[in-house]
Amino acid sequence: MEGVEDKALIYDSNCPMCCWYTDKFVQTGTLEKDGRISFDELTTTQAACIDWQRGRHEIPLLDKKSGKVMYGLDGLTYILSARWPFFAPVLQHPFGKKLVKPLYQFISYNRRIIVPHGVAAMPKYDCAPDFSLGWRLALILICGGIFVGLSYAIAVVQNPMAAMFIFLPTVLYLLTIVLGSRKNGREAMWNATGDFFVTQLSTFLLFLPFFLLMKWLLNDNVYGLLGAWMLMQVRLLFSFVRRMKNKGYMADSQAVV
């Protein structure tokens, strides 16, 4: 199995997932040591080869000799197939592409929301994806649906009163977002809402072992569940406020980490 030569993936350095998997490609020998270049590291000549509208949403794979570029799934299919040939028939098949493409777009359009930190205010090349209400709503519904489903599955919600106690904070957060982001516009509101649901789900998953402990080892200990839930709310509050501060959704200027 050989890696790809004379090509480089052009990745978003403000996307930890992009940084991680492109680095893994290099570590495993799938790409050469200089086979990953961040957008901010592009030379003027390399930048001129990129279709920027497309490149912000589909990661470019640049041929360093010819200057030709493949984008998104085409580039990733080329890389994976060169290293692991069994990927080729799956990713090149029309049905396989139809399955994978929505997942790719979901991650691409939401990558700046999924991460907890802010981004540089003055990047050399702006590779931020366009705002997409549809993909933002998809992120919100998926994160919110998993949160609600797991809450019911582990019986954190015992009765209507408990349900109100659990989901009332979500309503309060959303009201705060709507009121606090009005001056920054609709896009900021949906971005902040996406950030909230990502933070809520990640915080819930962090506390999930404690909820399972109270349910199965301590026989649905009410006080234990309540205590774990209150600690989760404290952690959620601090995490969400930190996100809002870093990303500057409710401020006049963009924060930089």
Image (cartoon, rainbow, N blue to C red):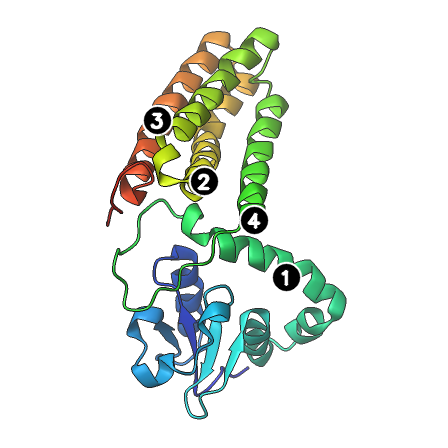
Asked whether the viewer can see residue 5, the reply is yes
- State which tag comes first along the sequence, 1 or 4: 1
Amino acid type, residue under disc 4 in the picture = Trp
Question: Looking at the image, is mark 4 or mark 2 earlier in the sequence?
Answer: 4
Left or right for 241, reference 225 = left
Is the residue 178 above or below the residue 218 in the image?
below
What residue sits 39% from the left and 82% below the top?
48
Q: Is residue 59 visible?
A: no
The residue wearing badge 2 is: 186
Foreground: disc 2 or disc 3: 2
* Pointer 1 residue: 101
Query: Which residue is under mark 4?
Result: 135
Residue for point 34% across, 40% down: 249
The answer to which of 36 and 172 lies nearer the viewer is 172
Q: Secondary structure at mark 2?
A: helix
Q: CA distance from mark 3 to mark 1?
A: 34 Å
Q: Which mark is residue 237?
A: 3
Helix, strand or loop under label 3: helix
Q: Disc 4 on helix, strand or loop?
A: helix
Sequence-wise, which precedes: disc 4 or disc 3? 4
Amino acid type at circle 3 is Leu
Q: Left or right? Give the position of 14 relative to 50.
A: left
Cα separation, mark 4 vs mark 2, equals 15 Å
